[in-house]
Image: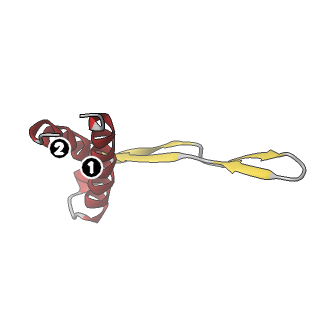
Amino acid sequence: MKYRGWILFFMIVIGFILGNLIGQLSGWEFLSYGGVFGLTSPVELNLGFLILTFGLTFNINIAGILGIIIAFVVFKFIKV
């Protein structure tokens, strides 16, 4: 019972990844419809002796959203 939130989080991430993969590999055009959100060019922090580069983008499509919904439904039916 203690790990229920973590299990839900990982199921959502796995559903999102599998949904995006299916959306890009399938022949159905409507599943791959979506957008890219985030930093298009990375942000650099130069400290003189250390350079840190930050960047994050999300590729969200219809199949990824369906994967998240399916992950929620599956989570409701498993006993954790």
Name, please, the residue furthest toward the left.
77
Q: In the image, which disc is placed on residue 48?
A: none
Marks 2 and 1 in Cβ contact (< 8 Å) = yes
What residue is shown at x 13% (from left), y 36% (from top)?
A: 76
What residue is shown at x 31% (from left), y 60% (from top)?
A: 21
What residue is shown at x 30% (from left), y 51% (from top)?
A: 14
Name, please, the residue furthest toward the front.
2
Q: Earlier in the sequence, mark 2 or mark 1?
A: 1
Tag 1: Cα neighbours inside 10 Å, few (<14), some, or many (≥20)?
Answer: many
Q: Front-most of 2 and 74?
A: 2
Question: Split into 4 quadrants, where in the image is the C terminus?
Answer: top left
User: Three-letter amino acid code at disc 1?
Assistant: Gly
User: Three-letter amino acid code at disc 2?
Assistant: Ile
The residue labelled by disc 2 is 70
| Image x and y of residue 71, in percent | 21, 44
The residue labelled by disc 1 is 15
Tag 2: Cα neighbours inside 10 Å, few (<14), some, or many (≥20)?
Answer: some
Q: Front-most of 8 and 13?
A: 8
